[in-house]
């Protein structure tokens, strides 16, 4: 009869500063990707919504490409392939940020477009009939209503982005999982280390996920 | 100005082909286990018994709220020590992604089942059917038709998620690409080719799903038989 | 004033005493292959109250929507206060096609107001907010100014007490009255009503018609697409009957509604006769 494994969180707890450095890295990457991803996503989403082909087609190509390729492939491409074309190095942060942001922009573009198009045409018509320009109608009337509807989907996307930051460990960016790998290999305690990492992520994300459910319920629609 | 040269990459096309095959293998295996497991989890969550509901909810929440890569590391590095079993990258990958996708499929199942109107339940019970019979004969058949597009979308997501196995050195397409890149010293061409391969495969799959969605939508819902 | 080519206005302001507010010549509108408007000529004088009747598909809504350029005419000219909107397309002057600049159309819409069948109130603003929106965003007025004016317009349509209510809390009739106040706040030279009561429950129609009649009594220039023949009879000084994209018959309410000369007009009136007026 083999003895059960003896859990020992000591080494992990002694190195909380190492994990903290990772947490800061995760946070930094997360904020960058959310800002770039949602910001650029709005631009692309409006581009997808546009009538003119010169705007619509490139936006569609962008969305289709970055939604249908895995993020890890994109990150590795930016890290290994892009430097060949450029006269300078691409840092792990840059590669990860580019990969995750562009991917998120493509997904959030569709969220924006769906939200905008779900608003009754009559709203834009009434705004135009009052003499508003197309930009004013979008800014004052359509987008404010659309944003409320898009909130659950956007929050979901934010949660996905947070989870995707772990992929940056593939290019050795100092985020939480990367630090976990470091500790696990130094102390030979993958069980405790990775369990702690998983728990930390869970504790960070669980409130957000619950908040999203509450949001969805309040807005009266549910996402499958 | 970099001169593109794809020849060395083509020379190693067999390595890439093997990678693609392995990607499909892992995805297929994860789906094969994940879908039934997802159904089980969904039914457990819908069960009136707390003993069934809570564990199911716990599994679903944990696997939806933690990053897939953390899950993979845990299954590959931690679990083998805990249960004293050797774990190959393939087994760890299939295990991780079966449970992970099951957690998401469970929500798709639950949403589909819940979306079938109460009236269907009541009609079944009024005929004297037991709840399990109503589920099996009346509700699930209707729910499944509605869930197919969501399923297929999740399956495509899975294909993208399985690229993570490259990190634990399973010879999937991405891992093989890295091998080829190092072998030929042409990372630009190698990774570009792979990105395009993934794009084509996944894009075609998505388009087929859209086609299917449209066909399902026009053929109407809730078939009796 | 008007050229001899235009049909006589029939009733209303005597010719020559006031400048034409809106002049339409040869208006055509095609959607793809389908020609909805096949040549409309119309003079709108200040104070005109024009009711536009016709079967579905006759083009009456399209005509209205061309007047504030929610639809761009395929051919023909619309002139507002003597100034033609748009530019003659180069090299195609004979074909009657014009090119339109969105900025100019936006300015036109500040002078021509529209009330929609589906109200189209902005749900994320209160009634007062809705009425203020045009003043703030389009006219650039300051909050206090806009609020005062909006309050006055809401009071005029009898909804001062609903100023802070959101559209979701209002009945259909109340929503339409807010929509009217919203259009009025812009001081339009012409008001267009696109079937304003068609989406309302019968009991709520009256409150909206009362407001429209009070506007008529103020001497506002209005064009009204409607199914309410009885109302058209009492409200309008001119009635247009549209069929197949052209004005089939026009004249005073008495002429068109009580003693129509054309067979089709007669058939239409018979079909829609809800009560003897």
Image (cartoon, rainbow, N blue to C red):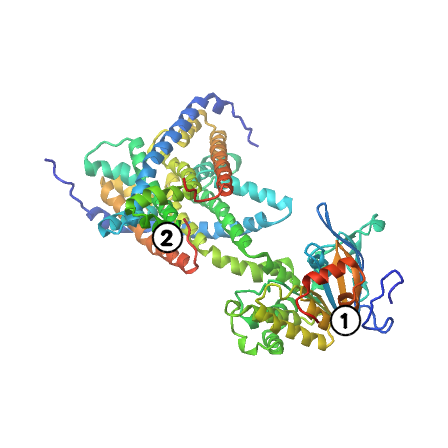
Where residue C106 appears, as percent x and y from the top left, is: 69, 61
Q: Residue at x 76, y 63 (%)?
A: C240
Please give the chain letter of the residue carrying mark 2.
B
Q: Is residue A11 visible?
A: yes
* Near-viewer residue (C108 or A183): C108
- Expressed as whole percent of the image width and height from the top left, the position of residue C189 reads 73, 70
Question: As rendered, which of A110 and A174 lies closer to the eye?
Answer: A110
Q: Secondary structure at mark 2?
A: helix
Instruction: Indicate left or right for C46 with B214 as reference.
Output: right
Rendered view: B149 above or below C71: above
**On the same chain: label 2 and label 1?**
no
Residue nearest the viewer, comparing A129 with C24:
C24
Which residue has dot 1 on it? C237
Q: Is residue B169 above or below residue C189?
A: above
Question: Considering the numbered disc 1 on the image, is that residue within a helix, a strand or a loop?
Answer: loop
Within 10 Å of disc 1 (Cα), the crowding (few <14, some 14-19, many 20+) is: many
Residue C210: which quarter of the image? bottom right
Could you give the CA–CA distance between mark 2 and mark 1, rounded to whole angstroms? 57 Å
The residue that disc 2 covers is: B118
Displayed quadrant of residue B79: top left
Q: Position of residue C5 (x, y in %)?
A: 88, 60
Seen as rendered, the residue at the extreme left is A1
Near mark 2 (Cα within 10 A), the count class, few <14, some 14-19 or many ≥20, is few
Protein chain holding label 1: C
Task: Say which quarter of the image contains residue A138.
Answer: bottom right
């Amino acid at each position: 009869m083999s003895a059960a494994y003896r859990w020992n969180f000591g080494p992990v707890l002694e190195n909380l500063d190492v994990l903290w450095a990772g947490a800061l890295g995760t946070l930094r990457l997360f904020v960058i990707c959310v800002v770039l991803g949602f910001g650029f996503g709005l631009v692309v989403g409006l581009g997808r919504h546009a009538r003119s082909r010169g705007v619509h087609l490139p936006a569609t190509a962008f969305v289709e490409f970055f939604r249908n390729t895995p993020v890890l492939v994109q990150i590795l491409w930016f890290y290994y392939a892009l430097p060949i074309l450029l006269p300078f190095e691409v840092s792990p942060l840059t590669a990860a940020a580019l990969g995750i942001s562009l991917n998120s922009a493509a997904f959030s573009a569709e969220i924006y477009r769906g939200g905008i198009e779900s608003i009754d045409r009559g709203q834009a018509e009434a705004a135009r009939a009052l003499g508003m320009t197309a930009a004013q109608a979008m800014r004052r009337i359509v987008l404010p209503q659309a944003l409320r509807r898009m909130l659950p989907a956007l929050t979901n996307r934010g949660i996905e982005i947070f989870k995707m930051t772990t992929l940056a460990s593939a290019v050795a960016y100092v985020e939480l999982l990367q630090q976990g790998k470091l500790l696990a290999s130094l102390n030979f305690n993958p069980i405790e280390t990775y369990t702690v990492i998983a728990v930390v992520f869970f504790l960070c994300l669980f409130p957000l996920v619950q908040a999203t459910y509450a949001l969805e319920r309040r807005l009266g629609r549910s996402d499958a | 100005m970099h001169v593109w040269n794809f020849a060395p990459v083509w020379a190693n096309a067999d390595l890439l082909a093997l990678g693609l095959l392995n990607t499909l293998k892992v995805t297929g295996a994860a789906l094969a286990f994940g879908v039934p497991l997802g159904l089980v989890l969904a039914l457990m969550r819908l069960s009136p018994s707390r003993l069934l509901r809570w564990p199911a909810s716990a599994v679903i929440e944990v696997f939806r709220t933690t990053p897939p890569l953390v899950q993979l590391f845990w299954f590959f590095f931690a679990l083998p020590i805990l249960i004293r079993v050797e774990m190959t990258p393939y087994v760890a990958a299939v295990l991780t992604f079966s449970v992970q996708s099951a957690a998401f499929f469970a929500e798709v199942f639950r949403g589909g089942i819940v979306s079938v109107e109460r009236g269907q339940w009541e009609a079944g019970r009024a005929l004297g059917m037991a709840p399990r019979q109503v589920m099996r004969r009346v509700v699930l058949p209707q729910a499944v038709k509605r869930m197919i597009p969501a399923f297929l979308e999740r399956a495509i997501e899975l294909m993208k998620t399985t690229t993570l196995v490259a990190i634990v050195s399973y010879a999937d397409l991405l891992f093989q690409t890295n091998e080829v890149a190092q072998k030929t010293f042409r990372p630009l061409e190698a990774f570009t080719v792979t990105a395009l391969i993934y794009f084509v495969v996944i894009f075609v799959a998505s388009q087929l799903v859209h086609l299917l969605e449209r066909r399902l939508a026009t053929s109407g819902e809730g078939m009796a038989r | 004033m008007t050229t001899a080519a235009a049909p006589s206005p029939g009733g209303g302001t005597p010719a020559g005493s006031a400048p034409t507010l809106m002049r339409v010549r040869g208006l055509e509108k095609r959607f793809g292959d389908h020609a909805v408007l096949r040549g409309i000529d119309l003079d709108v004088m200040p104070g005109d109250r024009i009711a536009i009747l016709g079967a579905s598909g006759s083009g009456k809504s399209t005509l209205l929507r061309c007047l504030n350029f929610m639809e761009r005419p395929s051919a023909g000219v619309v002139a507002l206060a003597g100034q033609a909107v748009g530019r003659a397309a180069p090299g195609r002057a004979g074909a009657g096609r014009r090119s339109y600049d969105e900025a100019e159309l936006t300015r036109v819409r500040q002078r021509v107001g529209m009330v929609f069948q589906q109200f189209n109130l902005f749900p994320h603003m209160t009634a007062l907010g809705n009425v203020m929106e045009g003043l703030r965003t389009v006219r650039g007025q300051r909050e206090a100014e806009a609020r005062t004016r909006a309050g006055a317009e809401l009071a005029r349509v009898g909804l001062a007490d609903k100023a802070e209510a959101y559209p979701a809390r209002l009945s259909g009739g109340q929503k339409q009255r807010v929509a009217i106040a919203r259009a009025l706040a812009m001081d339009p030279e012409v008001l267009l009503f696109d079937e304003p009561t068609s989406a309302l429950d019968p009991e709520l129609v009256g409150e909206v018609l009362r407001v429209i009649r009070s506007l008529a009594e103020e001497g506002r220039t209005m064009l009204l697409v409607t199914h309410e023949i009885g109302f058209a009879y009492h409200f309008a000084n001119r009635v247009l009957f549209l069929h197949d994209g052209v004005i089939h018959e026009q004249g005073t309410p008495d002429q068109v509604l009580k003693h129509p000369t054309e067979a089709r007009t007669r058939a239409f009136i018979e079909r829609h006769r809800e009560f003897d007026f």
